[in-house]
Amino acid sequence: MSVKSTCLISFVLVLALVGSASALVVKSGEVVTYDNRTRIPDGNTIVEAGGTLIFRARVDFDGGDELHIYGTVISEDTCKFPDSSGDQGVKAFIYNGGLWDASDIENRAGGDEASGGGRGDWITLSQGGTLIVRTRYGDGHQFYDPSFWMDDGSLITGEDGGEITFEELEGGAIKIVNGRPYAVPYARYPNPVDGALHNDTWINLSWRSGDLALSHDVYIGDNFDDVNAGAENTFRGNQTDNFIVAGFPGFPYPDGLVPGTTYYWRIDEVNDTEPNSPWKSDIWSFSIPPKTAYFPEPADGAEGVSVDPKLSWTPGFGSKLHTVYFGETFDEVDNATGGLPQGTVTYSPGTLKMARTYYWRVDEFDVIETYKGDIWSFTTEGAVTALEPVNGAADVTHTPVLTWAPGLGAAHDIFFGTDAGALEKKGSGNLGAESYEPGQLQWNTTYYWRVNEANSANTDSPWTGPLWSFTTANFLIIDDMEAYNDLDPAEDGSNRIFNAWIDGFDDPTNGSLVGYDQAPFAEQTIVHSGNQSLPMSYDNSVAGKSEATYVLTSNRDWTINGVNTLTIWFRGTSSNDPEPMYVALNDSAVVTNNNPNASKRGFWTEWNIDLQAFAGQGVNLTNVNSITLGLGNRSNPTAGGTGMMYFDDIRLYAP
């Protein structure tokens, strides 16, 4: 296989980020706030997708640092670029899904056009990235020479910052001066953040108002669907304030919020002078902790736990004393009574046996009432471990191969079924045969399995393995790219991705190459779901078309369970040359994507195709033997361009 240089841009970026070991990294789910003229730590700052970085006052970056935004950055005052030395300013990169909402950006080294002080490559907006400027943008209200302005990147101005237009400079760079504002009409930035745990029975909800809002319709309820539908019992009124209290007399939920309950809320922005009003916000949520203990450590169902564990938990809402029950069976712990209360939230059960599952519960007492806790479990080290599918996996194929890593046993028994309390024994085996194929499974069904082990040389034998579960998909998986590996072809189980997807290697009429020439051969960074996707470079400069074909050895009946839609997730890069993208079945019927620039989309895009489009071309949907992904004009190959594509999650859905 030849090296695919067109994919290097992504890897260079990843390496650049990984190299910033001392940087501030805001991970998914984290909210990091900097206040009162603080300085961001030296090194490049990374805000991962799902993470939020908030500047509540002036925040300084050292000159030459970089800000990589995949999640959300909010600047509520002034963000100064660069430091007072006037050296090259910080570079900001806003990638797909990233958002920067800034009240005031002060580019002190920016200068004006006449001085030539513009900072080239200062901010880059990738496709799907958004920069919102609410007051001004640098000295002289000017923004100079971003190196890239992707088709789907956007700059939005509002409030005092309405002085922006776009003007192309030499080399395709863009200068932004003297323009008009663009309003964001939706309520956003909920407080508390979406999914927060709120440790009280009242709450003050607030949000940032939409730019066009004159008033707000408020919806709050304990049922997602009701809030989403705007059910009458969730409407809390129309108001001009952008906050509302709940859990006090005279407010929603006057008797107080209920512990152990999740509440949902949304804000519709209203302006009767605007034809698109009201603007519905996302559905946000917060939860009140339960009266029972929660967040056990080790986590419920944990495996490989030390035989000398220290158990801990988060106390229930309002609890004062805690009673711990511990044992080797569920029923023993569930029926236990009369334990000794304690004031601490840790418990040491002593030295335990290896490869055993233990059960425990914590009852909470709040001076008035005792609340019986859930039954938790963990398994100590030395037990079997599920490899595939992992415990709790969803969207599992209907023909899985169950595999596990052996524990202390030399022999094993396999139990499987849909009733966790009555699993059927399905077979036995010895060390070295750690797999089981249950056959064709039902759609959207939860299955349970366990592997018990025995070893006559160990006095603790036999061992009952932990209970595992998985749920099958409600769709038919054609290829999710997860089964491929990097094993040598001479090794048992070798399944390299370019041996399954046949490309144009050594075929002068086909300009495609699947996979990479060095392991890992599948793409493991740019993925839609799971751990891998299919990378395919295309070169139509000579062959005129580039395609890869996958021959189906199973799932050939594309009418099962009433499926009627083929779904393919794809992603290109903005540097790709535009080429028609198509899919073919049985090397005959072809459907072309209706977007001529689909190959340039730099974010994951879902492509849904009605199967009748293939049936109408003569394909027998009960016997589909191959699927082909391609770039170019298959029926009339014409010399074209080059690029890199990624494909993932090829599935069939029922109505």
Image (cartoon, rainbow, N blue to C red):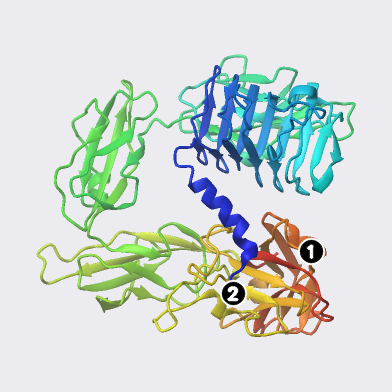
Q: Looking at the picture, which amino acid does disc 1 mark?
A: Pro
First along the sequence among labels 1 and 2: 2
Looking at the figure, which quarter contains the C terminus?
A: bottom right
| Residue 559, image x, y percentages | 67, 77
Residue 578 — which label?
A: 1
Question: What's the distance in space between the residues labelled 1 and 2, CA to CA?
Answer: 22 Å
Give coordinates of residue 582: x percent, y percent: 76, 72
Q: Is residue 48 left or right of residue 94?
A: left
> Mark 2: which amino acid?
Ser
Camera-side residue of 196 and 469? 196
Q: Which residue is mark 2?
A: 2
Quick one: quadrant of the N terminus?
A: bottom right
Looking at the image, which residue is at 49% across and 35% down?
Answer: 24
> For the point 73% across and 56% down, which residue is it?
574
Callout 2 secondary element: loop
Left or right: residue 334 versus residue 192 is left
* Quadrant hosting residue 651: bottom right
Q: Secondary structure at mark 1?
A: loop
